[in-house]
Image: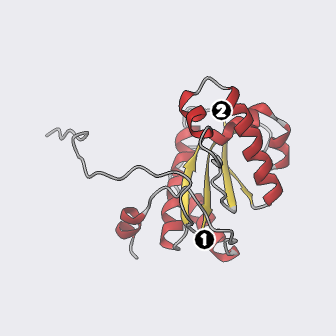
Amino acid sequence: MNTLEALQARKSIRGYLDKPVEADKLKTILKYGNKAPNAGPIHMSVIQNANLLKEINDVATEAGLKSDNDFLKQRLAIPGYKLLYGAPVLIVLSAPDGEFSAANTACAATNMCIAATELELGTCYLAGFLLAFTAKPELLQKIGIPEGFKPRCGMIIGYEGPDQIPGMEWIEDYSNINYVD
């Protein structure tokens, strides 16, 4: 698979097999996260501990149900729905406060999604789970977030299983592009 094929094949996976991700594949994915364009530091916390993944999922779910986010509440109302979709790996991307922090972490996550696709792994870019760190700040220490850094986004990785909820179908539409000569 070349880069363009990986970009075409990439999709958000919302259900994972109970199968660990091999260390060498994870190392490759992280390598390409670090090669992403950036304008400042980022930190990646790689979580594979099933108990910690469950705790983050459960705390974020409880916080989501109490939030004002109607979309999230709708998702959480789906029977059996899990914010982390049962993935065996969660990577939390953090950065210090700054003008480019969100862009830096999003670029790293994008690179990792494409690398994982090349390695025949599924991914999903996430933000809803971040509620766990506001609801239970001690989780920041548990996952090794450095002083002065704040979780900005995350991605889950694993082998594709049955979807918990249907994803959005990609529609080839270029009406959002304006060429200026």
Residue type at numbered disc 2: Asp
Give the residue at x 68% y 72%.
Answer: 19
Whole-percent x and y of residue 93?
Answer: 65, 48
Name the side, left or right, on which 7 lies relative to 91. left
Q: Camera-side residue: 85 or 108?
A: 85
In the rendered view, does 55 fall on the left or right side of 10?
right
Q: Nearer the viewer, residue 87 or 155?
A: 87
Residue tagged by mark 2? Answer: 97
User: As drawn, which residue projects farthest toward the left?
Assistant: 181
Q: Looking at the image, is 107 positioned above or below residue 175? A: below
- The answer to whether residue 9 is visible is yes
Answer with the quarter of the image where residue 181 lies.
top left
Q: Position of residue 176 (x, y in %)?
A: 26, 39
Residue 51 x/y as whole percent? 83, 56
Relative to the observer, which residue lies in front, 67 or 74?
A: 74
For the point 62% across and 56% down, which residue is it?
156
Residue at image mark 1: 28
Picture coordinates of residue 77, whole percent (x, y) = 61, 37
Assign a secondary structure to mark 1.
helix
Position of the N terminus by quadrant: bottom left
Q: In the rendered structure, which disc, 2 or 1, sits on the residue that comes first in sequence? A: 1
On residue 111, which mark appears?
none
